[in-house]
Image (cartoon, coloured by chain):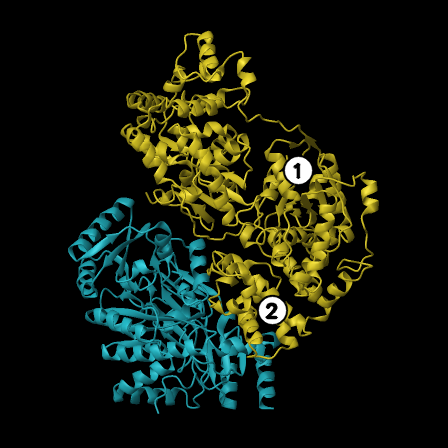
Chain colours: A cyan, B yellow
């Protein structure tokens, strides 16, 4: 009965076409390609405006039903699979690119705009500008990426993608709307501050404090020439030194690292990929020479790679999802660990041990962020979605890796429920207490994606 | 590439990661999946549908009418196949959906409208999904005076025979006029509608019946005017377990081929602005994009403008996959979107190559009062006047009698490297060659440029004789170590790793240049091709330079077999990177009685077509260039026109220098191998000075060996070296990475 009332009301709010509670439609919203177990969803609704979202929130408060906002659904860690059922708000109909400011280099867009759409739009209309691009497929949303502190293209030079937010429009769990950043007092969405920084409340909080409906992110000039220079290391202990030297000369746009035991020729090596940009081919050649020297000096062998390999690394976005088919099973999840540089060798060595312990092929990658201030290490686990056993093994490996991350002094990124639990167990009690107070104040009925960051 | 079989589909389907590439156009600019665009829920994307099917076949969810609705709400247009990045199984995505429909049909969940397709088709009064009274085509045969036996069968298809008869009749008229030896059969439905809707019980029986009928009239080739029949006969038969060795052609392929061979010429004008709609069956599912365009471009008076979404990115007409019968209103909405896109081109005529597309586009045209004229390409051709030209037969085998009676002995008198006092001197040498006299100076002096083959007016291929005698008498005295090393270096492996290709899609044969010249083969022009290269697919004509033609004879059958092992079929398009490869498959094979294993495409033809398709993106280069025509091109002089066409499109003036075209000079790269090192410098100097004299600012190549040999010398004169394909990329705004 209550379901009928809710669905009727939802239909009134967004239109009949954009609400479903058919189990066949709900199915794909109950799981993601990661290793989390499926969790039930009661309704999926696709609003078109912030006013519709306000109405949905009012309904949820009224009926004490949970709400989970969803972008592309590609976090892999189950963050948009509701923990306590309820309504999934699929944001894809809010897909307008509202403003490009070429002068202050930002874009204002609705929260359902995908990375693919933004990339394509800029290429067509503002080819001199580039957005930050995560290593996720193009169906990931811009909002989803920046709100989980995403990383990817331009992270080394400009920081994690969360730091590229200039402003947000948020519908709070009470239905109120607030603008954060310079847009709170200006027509220009150009800057986060200087104001008390509430934008931070909505990043990596996984939708527990409100629904972002509009946002502004920074854009960057597109370089005329871009290339990637590959290097090969034998010993992970040599990694920090070579990275310190590369970042000291300040030429790297992005820096990636990777190791995997398969195919056999890759086993035992650590691959270094340094992206450089320039105004001319000569500029690129000059920087390549500098890198080759640094590589050589630091026991890192310059590596010429086949063109296909090279091309795959030049793509935007990089097709990282390829890893999902490593075990021919369509499943893929990883612990993204934000760690300090000095812990990178340990992370690789001990991460590989975890994989081997569970009979998995060690496959670890990483990205440098903000100069060298953070390294995000991806401990990846591909699995067969058709095998419950395989998925359980992946969950165990993820569990051990979350623990390892904490041991290394790091922070698991966009952590799944188990990871959040491990973080909370180790988190400063004052932090936890503040988080609970904020949550209880902003969301008195506990309707927003409950179960995440749950401080009891 | 495929490493899995469709029969294992239940064990593969869960490999979809639902990353979502399948939803968009290639550049992500638009949602290009009709059902996802309409319904928006993730369940209606390809990924969502596959996940749903998986949940149903594993009993995680129960079968239901609504579940079936999701599975059937797909036009099977194949946009997902084009954009899915998982190339181990992406070619199966539509098959997975059709398999899901089979499962639904087995359990009684095939929607009622779609069930009608089956009921009518298996009814012996109809044998077609429209429920029209069956025609055995006897009357048509009589009316068009068609024989009982013929080389070709025109497989009409149900839509053309019962709904779009004008299209059928236009095809019949064309085939009669052009003199095809063809007939008709008492055909039953090709079963495309039933395969698409998962109702496959009778499919095998019908396919077998049709193939048997075709064989009974003695035909080995089939022509269809329906994209659906074409795809089914070409691709689906083997998937359904019905094998055949028939060659299947769509009308557009045949007509394009005739135009290319100069056997057909349009003699009247058609002054209209038109656009072309790619049928999914013909385009995405059979990779046939260019032939209709080649035809449209050659119709005098036509202004052909592409729609925003074309080829792999085309927006479906909405009729396919059972949607036209299952949800007719939605089918028209999809067509409406296509026609709105056509409106943006300013065209008054929309041309397609599928009777079913035509039907649906026309229905939308009427319903939404869009005021277009919608025609099938063959109907458009029916409105034109055209002439059929005699096919020129070319002799490929060395013909002694021609040489004995030859007036001018062009092969020797025009040679740029051996000088004869007069024609009688040349005749003496010619007689020596014919009599296999080892003392002929031609055998020792010939530098192997193949010019004689091109100069011969009889098509006798004198170089084949010269080269065979050079080997027999070891006339060139090549360094035996070099010869042996080269023979070993390019020897095909005893066993090759099978990497199955999709024969309906083009293959790029990079010869042995893939590794050394990777940057020249990159960029969008060469992306997304299946590639076969390396020594197992090497043309081996290099051994002509070393006077070892026997090695070629020995290895070519192995190479051809290797192509076959990979799944390359006779009508697979193989783009040959190098002139020598193209020359092997088009010239060498023919004159040595070796069956051409596939449809070779010259690299510059591909470049030209690509440029045509992206004409609006071209920025003319406006440069003067010398062309270094490579010797291998002398086997295939007919392809030299592509150099001119490409140059014209991208704004290159091919300077009319002395050493171009038939007077081209060899780059001299192979001279040292033949003990003719002393000839290298004078030949190259002559060549480069000629470039300078004619004001060339760049030198264009189509052969990596020529480029390597001449680049430094040319550069010293301030002339830059480029492959022509790379200049084409540059004209399209691509940055060259070397």
Residue A21 visible, this angle:
yes
Asked which secondary structure carries label 2, the reply is helix
**Image quadrant in which you'd find residue B239:** bottom right
Chain under callout 2: B
Residue at point 34%, 73% (across, down): A359
Chain under callout 1: B
Asked which secondary structure carries label 1, the reply is loop
Q: Return the x and y of residue B544 as percentages of the image width and height.
A: 41, 29
The quadrant the C terminus of chain B occupies is top left
**Which mark is on residue B271?**
1
Mark closer to the chain start, 2 or 1: 2
Residue A115 is left or right of residue A433, and the answer is right
Residue at point 32%, 28% (across, down): B673
Per the model, the C-alpha gap separating discs 2 and 1 is 47 Å
Disc 2 vs disc 1: Cβ atoms closer than 8 Å?
Answer: no
Q: Tell me if residue B518 comes above or below residue A49 in the rendering.
A: above
Q: Return the x and y of residue A10 as percentages of the image width and height.
A: 57, 81
> In the image shown, does B206 or A90 lie closer to the viewer?
B206
**Which mark is on residue B100?**
2
**Image quadrant in which you'd find residue B689:** top left
Residue A79 visible, this angle:
no
Q: Return the x and y of residue B674 as percentages of the image width and height.
A: 33, 25
């Amino acid at each position: 009965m209550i379901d009928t009332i809710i669905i009727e009301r939802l239909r009134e709010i967004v239109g009949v076409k954009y609400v479903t509670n058919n189990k066949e439609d709900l199915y794909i919203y109950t799981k993601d390609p990661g290793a989390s177990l499926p969790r039930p969803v009661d309704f999926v609704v696709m609003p078109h405006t912030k006013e519709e979202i306000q109405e949905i929130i009012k309904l949820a408060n009224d009926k004490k039903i949970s709400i989970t906002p969803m972008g592309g659904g590609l976090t892999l860690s189950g963050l948009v699979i509701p923990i306590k059922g309820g309504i999934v708000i699929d944001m894809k109909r809010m897909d307008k690119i509202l403003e490009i400011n070429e002068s202050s280099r930002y874009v204002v867009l609705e929260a359902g705009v995908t990375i693919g759409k933004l990339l394509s739009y800029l290429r067509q209309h503002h080819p001199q500008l580039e957005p930050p691009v995560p290593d996720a497929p193009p169906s990931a949303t811009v909002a989803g990426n920046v709100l989980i502190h995403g990383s990817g293209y331009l992270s080394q030079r400009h920081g994690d993608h969360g730091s590229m937010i200039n402003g947000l429009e948020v519908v709070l769990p009470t239905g109120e709307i607030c603008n954060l950043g310079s847009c709170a007092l200006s027509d220009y969405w150009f800057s986060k501050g200087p104001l008390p920084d509430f934008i931070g409340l909505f990043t990596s909080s996984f939708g527990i404090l409100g629904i972002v409906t509009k946002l502004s992110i920074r854009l960057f000039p597109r370089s005329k020439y871009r290339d990637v220079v590959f290097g090969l290391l034998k010993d992970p202990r040599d990694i920090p030194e070579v990275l310190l030297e590369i970042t000291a000369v300040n030429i790297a746009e992005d820096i990636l690292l990777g190791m995997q035991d398969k195919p056999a020729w890759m086993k035992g090596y650590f691959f270094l990929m340094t992206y450089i940009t320039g105004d001319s081919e000569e500029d690129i050649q000059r920087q390549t020479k500098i890198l080759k020297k640094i590589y050589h000096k630091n026991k890192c062998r310059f590596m010429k790679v086949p063109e296909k390999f090279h091309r795959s690394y030049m793509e935007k976005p990089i097709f990282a999802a390829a890893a999902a088919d490593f075990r021919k099973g369509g499943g893929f999840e990883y612990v993204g660990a934000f760690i300090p540089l000095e812990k990178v060798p340990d992370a690789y060595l001990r991460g590989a041990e975890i994989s081997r312990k569970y009979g998995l092929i060690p496959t670890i990658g990483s990205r440098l962020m903000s100069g060298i201030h953070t390294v995000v290490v991806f401990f990846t686990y591909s699995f067969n979605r058709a095998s419950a056993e395989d998925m359980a093994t992946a969950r165990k490996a993820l569990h051990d890796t979350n623990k390892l991350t904490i041991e290394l002094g790091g922070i698991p990124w966009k952590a799944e429920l188990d990871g959040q639990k491990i973080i909370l167990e180790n988190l400063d009690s004052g932090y936890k207490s503040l988080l609970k107070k904020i949550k209880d104040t902003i969301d008195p009925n506990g309707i927003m994606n409950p179960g995440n960051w749950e401080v009891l | 590439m495929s490493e899995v079989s469709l029969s294992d589909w239940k064990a593969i389907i869960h490999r979809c990661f639902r990353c979502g590439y399948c939803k968009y156009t290639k550049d992500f600019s638009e949602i290009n999946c009709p059902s996802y665009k309409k319904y928006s829920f993730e369940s209606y994307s390809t990924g969502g549908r596959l996940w749903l099917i998986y949940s149903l076949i594993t009993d995680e969810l129960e079968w239901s009418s609504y579940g079936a609705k999701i599975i059937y709400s797909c036009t099977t247009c194949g946009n997902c196949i084009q954009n899915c990045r998982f190339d181990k199984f992406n070619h199966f995505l539509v098959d997975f959906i059709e398999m899901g429909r089979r499962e639904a049909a087995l359990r009684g969940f095939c929607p009622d409208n779609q069930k009608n397709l089956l009921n009518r088709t298996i009814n012996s009064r109809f044998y077609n999904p429209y429920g029209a009274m069956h025609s055995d085509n006897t009357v048509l045969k009589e009316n068009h005076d068609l024989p009982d036996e013929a080389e070709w069968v025109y497989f009409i298809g149900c839509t053309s025979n019962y709904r779009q008869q004008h299209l059928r009749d236009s095809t019949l008229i064309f085939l009669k006029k052009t003199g095809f030896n063809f007939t008709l059969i008492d055909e039953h439905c090709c079963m495309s509608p039933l395969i698409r809707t998962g109702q496959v019980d009778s499919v095998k029986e019908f396919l077998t019946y049709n193939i048997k009928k075709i064989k009974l009239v003695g035909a080995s080739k089939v022509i269809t005017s329906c994209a659906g029949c074409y795809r089914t006969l070409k691709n689906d038969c083997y998937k359904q377990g019905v094998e055949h060795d028939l060659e299947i052609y769509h009308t557009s392929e045949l007509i394009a081929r005739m135009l290319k061979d100069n056997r057909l010429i349009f003699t009247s004008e058609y002054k209209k602005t038109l656009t072309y709609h790619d049928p999914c069956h013909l385009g995405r599912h059979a990779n046939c994009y260019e032939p209709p365009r080649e035809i449209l471009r050659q119709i005098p008076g036509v202004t052909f403008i592409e729609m925003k979404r074309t080829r792999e990115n085309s927006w479906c007409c909405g009729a396919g996959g059972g949607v036209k019968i299952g949800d007719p209103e939605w089918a028209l909405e999809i067509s409406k979107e296509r026609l709105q896109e056509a409106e943006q081109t300013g065209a008054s005529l929309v041309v397609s190559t599928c009777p079913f597309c035509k039907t649906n586009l026309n229905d939308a045209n009427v319903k939404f009062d869009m005021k277009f004229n919608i025609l099938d390409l063959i109907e458009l051709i029916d409105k034109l006047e055209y002439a059929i030209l005699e096919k020129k037969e070319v002799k490929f085998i060395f013909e002694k009698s021609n040489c004995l009676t030859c007036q001018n002995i062009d092969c020797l008198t025009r040679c740029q490297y051996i000088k004869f006092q007069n024609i009688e001197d040349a005749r003496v040498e010619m007689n020596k060659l014919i009599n296999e006299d080892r003392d002929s100076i031609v055998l020792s002096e010939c530098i192997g440029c193949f010019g004689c083959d091109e100069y011969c007016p009889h098509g006798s291929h004198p170089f084949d004789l010269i080269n065979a005698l050079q080997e027999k008498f070891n006339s060139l005295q090549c360094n035996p170590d070099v010869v042996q090393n080269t023979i070993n270096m390019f020897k095909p492996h005893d066993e090759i790793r099978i990497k199955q290709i999709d024969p309906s899609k083009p293959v790029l044969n990079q010869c042995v240049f893939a590794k050394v010249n990777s940057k020249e083969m990159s960029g969008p022009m060469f992306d997304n091709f299946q590639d076969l290269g390396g020594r197992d697919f090497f043309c081996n004509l290099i051994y002509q330079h070393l006077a070892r033609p026997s090695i070629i004879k020995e290895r070519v059958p192995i190479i051809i077999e290797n192509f076959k092992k990979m799944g390359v079929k006779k009508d697979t398009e193989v783009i040959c990177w190098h002139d020598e490869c193209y020359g092997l498959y088009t010239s060498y094979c023919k004159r040595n009685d070796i069956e051409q294993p596939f449809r070779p495409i010259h690299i510059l033809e591909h470049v030209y077509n690509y440029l045509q398709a992206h004409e609006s993106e071209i920025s003319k280069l406006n440069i003067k260039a010398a062309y270094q025509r490579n010797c291998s091109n002398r086997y295939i002089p007919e392809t030299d026109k592509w150099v001119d066409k490409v140059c014209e499109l991208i704004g290159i003036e091919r300077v009319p220098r002395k050493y171009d075209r038939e007077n081209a000079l060899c780059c001299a790269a192979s001279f040292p191998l033949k003990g003719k090192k002393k000839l290298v410098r004078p030949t190259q100097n002559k060549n480069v000075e000629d470039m300078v004299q004619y004001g060339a600012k760049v030198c264009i190549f189509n052969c990596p060996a020529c480029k390597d040999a001449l680049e430094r010398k040319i550069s010293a004169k301030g002339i830059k070296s480029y492959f022509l394909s790379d200049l084409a990329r540059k004209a399209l705004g691509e940055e060259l990475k070397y």
